Amino acid sequence: MTATGPTTALDVVDVVALGESMVTFLPSRPGRLADVPSFDRAIGGAESNVACMLAAAGHSARWVSRVGADGFGDHLVETIGAYGVDVSAVRRDPARPTGVYFRTAGDRAGDGHEVAYYRTGSAASAMSAENMDLQAVRAGRVLHLSGITAALSDGCFALLWQLTAPRPDRPLISFDVNFRPGLWRDADGPRVLLDLARRADIVFIGTDEAHAAWGVTGGPAEIRELLPEPEVLVVKEGARGATAFETVGPRAAVPLAGVSPRAVVSPGAARVGAGGTPPALGCATDPRPAPTPPTEQPTFAPALTVDIAAAVGAGDAFAAGFLSATLRNLPVGTRLRHGHLMAAAALTTPGDLATPPARDHADRLAALDDAAWGRLRLGPGWTVARDRAEEEVRTP
């Protein structure tokens, strides 16, 4: 399905992404925030990033959120809409501002990296089941959510809990754990994220996040033991690559082709609490033992060699690439490669958003044999080099 511009709130789209997006101010030169004289304006938001990249890749996508009735809110809605994303279900809040943040240049993992968030009390932090268009949220083949939203407020957490509850019209739930320790007001964050992940169908998690949130010291197999419920678990290992665990058999996902939306009950959907009522923060989780991990063969796809322009937005781009290939019913190994290709597009572009490769270009690269994939090296501008494979497949 190809995006054709804004749709009505009841139109079923490929992907709905719900979450906060903020106006981002990027420094005009390297240095401390105290020393940077000026900033360039951009946008940033895990879920809207995924929606924008999917729309740019030819899928229909909807972003659902709340923004302030201010110029920054106008900028977010107009910019995200310009990617071909349906923004008709975005709500304006006249009493709360649009969130903004400032960051230093370079890799956000660097020692000198600074980020200054101004999102407390933002319009998006007031999202709840009572003030959002849940019909528009559920009208997608896939609903993409993030752990960042759960951290914004109790109302946001309750909204995610309701959206991940089992019900006949529930779409396929994609959940990026996105553990951000600084966003959580107390020690309940890791438990909340684990509970939400267990209710999802597709889960994205990095080994570094699993270690920080849950103390997992092993690799992907240990994370799968902790999260046996999702039909697909994608474990990212940074520059090494990513491993996908996919359940086959009676619990496996129904093919997405022709299903709009897909009725599904996640295997882990009833582990904690019931229906749309979230457990009280700080209470114990369901004491019942987790189900036996499924017997399955993990699939690993090595990451690409990339000339990095900015190490931001790669995780969101990976999720977009993987979901794009999932919507097309491609094999799990190919889905991982499309995730890596989309991440490479983000890594070779300054800022959070990048132009993805054309679909035929990405398909050609994803179909390379293992040796050629290992020799692939991508730099700035590679997404438009559709017919220059000889320049792309070279020994680093």
Image (cartoon, rainbow, N blue to C red):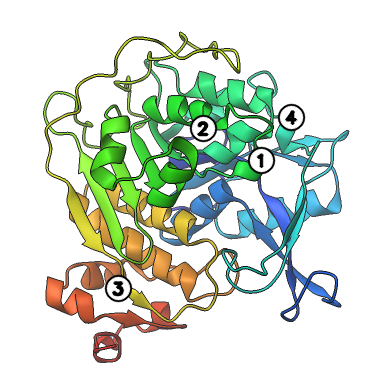
Give the number of the disc on residue 361.
Answer: 3
Q: Residue at x 36, y 67 (%)?
A: 239
- Is 47 rendered above or below residue 136? below
Residue 264 position, x and y percent, is 31, 22
Q: Which of the pair 230/106 is nearer the observer?
A: 106
Residue 171 position, x and y percent, is 39, 29
Of the residues under marks 3 and 1, which one precedes in the sequence? 1
Q: State the CA–CA distance, disc 3 to disc 1.
A: 38 Å
Q: Name the residue under label 2.
A: 190
Of the residues under marks 2 and 4, which one precedes in the sequence? 4
The label nearer to you, 3 versus 1, is 1
Q: Residues within 10 Å of mark 2 (few under 14, many from 20)?
A: many
Q: State the CA–CA distance, disc 4 to disc 3.
A: 41 Å
Q: State the CA–CA distance, disc 3 to disc 2.
A: 39 Å
Q: Name the residue under label 4.
A: 126
Local SS, label 4: helix
Of the residues under marks 4 and 1, which one precedes in the sequence? 4
Q: Name the residue under label 1.
A: 183
The label nearer to you, 4 versus 1, is 1
